[in-house]
Amino acid sequence: MLSNPFALSRRFCAVSLTGLTVLLLLRPLEAGPLPPLGVDDFRTLIDPKRSPNPGPAMAGQTLAEYRRKLRQAAEELPSLGEVSRVLLMSEWSAAELDVESPLPLDRVRRAVRQTEDEAFKREVQRLMVDYSDDPGSVTQALVAEIKREVRLQLLQRLENRMRFFLNQERSADRIAAANLISDMVNTSRRQDISQYYGVPGVMISTPKDVTPSAHYLRQRLRELSGDLEKLLNDPSPQVRVAGIRALSDLEKDPADLVAILKPLLAKQQNDVLTRRAAAEGLGRILEVYTAQMDKARPQPYLKAVEQVLPVAAASLADSDPRVRRACLEACQQAALVLDDLASDPLARERYPAFRPTLAVVDAVLPHLDGCARDRIPELRVGASRVLETFALTVQKMQSYKEEPLPPAAPEPSKTSPPDKERDKDNKKQTTLPIQLPVSEGERGVLTPRLCYREVNTPQLGYREVNTPQLGYRGLLVEHRGVNTPRSPIIQTAAFRAPQLDELPPPVPLEDAGIQGTVQTMIDNLKHPDYRVRLAAADTLETFGKQAEAAIPALVAALRDSNKFVRWSAARTLGRLSPRRAEEVVPGLMRLLDDREDPSVRIAAAKALELYGEHAKQAAPLLARVINRGDKEYIMAILTAIQGIGTDAALALPNVAWILSDRTYPPSVRIEAARTLGRFGPLAKNQLPVLRDVMTNDPDEDVRNAASTAVLAVDRPFE
């Protein structure tokens, strides 16, 4: 048996080794810039305008190099957020290989699937020989197949990672993955809409021109619906809410989605968060399903209304006001879709297709009538609005039934006896009497012909309603049934590369006398007239690195009495980065708190961003002043922090504070989430803030950005 002192010494050594291991694991990463983003490089590689087009002799070598670069770029995408951004690129539309080609598809795919470059080159050269009369088609088909193969690999990687997170034990992982799925589906759908809308509300082509790439991406994401449905049985209400939102955004059959959401709404014992999400999901189903509505075939959309409307109306008596409000909004969405379909000029000929839907409307009127007595006045007004819309639609359809289009047969002769009964019926006023509470204890009849004035403005997505009998006037109701793109457009919740100052590249000046000009500009920076000093600073900006000798004068100009000179000097110094950073950075730091003009502060922050890791001494100051300006200033500070890299990690608590403060605009908070995500594991201490925002923030885009950041910061698979 070991002696007691030796046993103590052994335990001491074990504890020491354990502590040393923990310290090594927790040791901060080596200082330096953050890893580069590969999204922009990937965009360049798949851009159809930059596709390789070699001659027949060099086709094998050039295409093999292109295939190697594209595969490597795909493998080097570091995060799930970047993979999603790449898959959402519109440039993929040319890579579907749906175009007609004289080449047999099996030969093209066999060539691309060759694992060795030499084998690939041989196959390419054989194709070039066999189709020597059209080498351009050979190159085009091979490039498209290379893109398609890489894209399918990225899709498979996305699906595998998504399934990994959706089936994790940690709730935060499941929420983040569900939010990212929702964000990708919505972004993809907006890309489809933007293909046939040149400007908001002005259609320039038909919905048939939908981008096949975006549509295929949504089809693949629908494969995850089974994993999302499992989230609805999760014990955490936040997980269930995220699953409901993601499922509602998928373009699944409305009947299947309603069957999933109906039990969640029907049981009052379900928690209120789940019921609210399910109620919001009902309206979302119609919004998604009718975003690109084809009025020439109304049956699918009428069926969707028939599925959603009864479930939403039945929950108008829910104990929670927000559930009732969301259900009423779903009813309103159904009413607007039905009204939009009924307003089509050809709806008269399709009246039989509307009959089942009108029967459903008649069945839910009592529920809407009950909501029109709700103790919350706003819900009363909303229910009355929905009732009125339904009444107008029914009246419109009844007029179609009672006054059908004349047959194509010749007109009857004048000697034919008049149909008195038909004339009598045609003179009848067709209204739909609906019992509405005009006031407490008083009943009234809604006659839409008398109280409704509507101005349809599909280009703007609104219509104006004037209903003095119901006590409101000039109300703008969003007409979601109209094919209009959602605004504003949301950016993908993934991190973008820091943007350089938007300037043309410096003019290359090779003249030997340029230094004399630089010296002249240096002298002009001391001129008493501010216009001369400003012109000098602007001129030096175009010289690029050849203006390095002017750096001391430009640093002095950062203290100029004229704000425009200070602004221009800061921009010029940014263009000279990272030269003489030890002189420039302190001068730029002083401008971060410029009291006279916010543009000067923004220019200083952008210049510091360009100095990158050489501006690390500015990191503490950036953390302190991050909240001392407007939206653009905060955005510039955030990108400067990203530009500095890991040495700016000390500013991350302040960045997290910006993210959590809901008084800031969503765009600022989204950028704050992106900043935290770019720092990866260094931002682990900010995970509680990210998870709280991801789960509870009222803004969908902010939640999505925080979700992507969580996946970038907390990496259990690494």
Image (tube, rainbow, N blue to C red):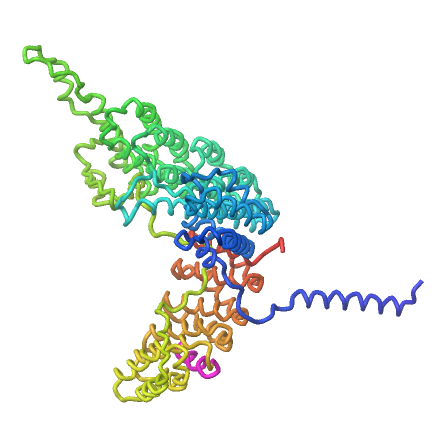
Quarter location, residue 333: top left
Q: Where does the image place residue 703, in percent across and percent down from the top left?
A: 46, 53
Q: Residue at x 20, y 32 (%)?
A: 448
Which residues are the magenta region? 581-593
Q: Residue at x 5, y 13 (%)?
A: 414
- Answer above or below: position of 120 versus 642: above
Can you name the residue that lies furthest to the right here? Answer: 1
- Answer above or below: position of 401 versus 553: above
Q: Quadrant of the N terminus?
A: bottom right
Q: Where does the image place residue 162, in percent across and percent down from the top left?
A: 55, 46
Can you name the residue that lies furthest to the left here? Answer: 415
Q: Where does the image place residue 109, in percent across and percent down from the top left?
A: 52, 42
Task: For residue 81, say whether it is visible.
Answer: no
Q: Residue at x 43, y 47 (%)?
A: 135
Between 593 and 200, which is closer to the camera in this rendering? 200
Q: Is residue 463 left or right of residue 525?
A: left
Between 218 and 670, which is closer to the camera in this rendering? 218
Between 139 and 549, which is closer to the camera in this rendering? 139
Q: Residue at x 68, y 67 (%)?
A: 24
Task: For residue 151, say whether it is visible.
Answer: yes
- Answer above or below: position of 279 versus 125: above
**Prevailing SS of the magenta stretch:** helix
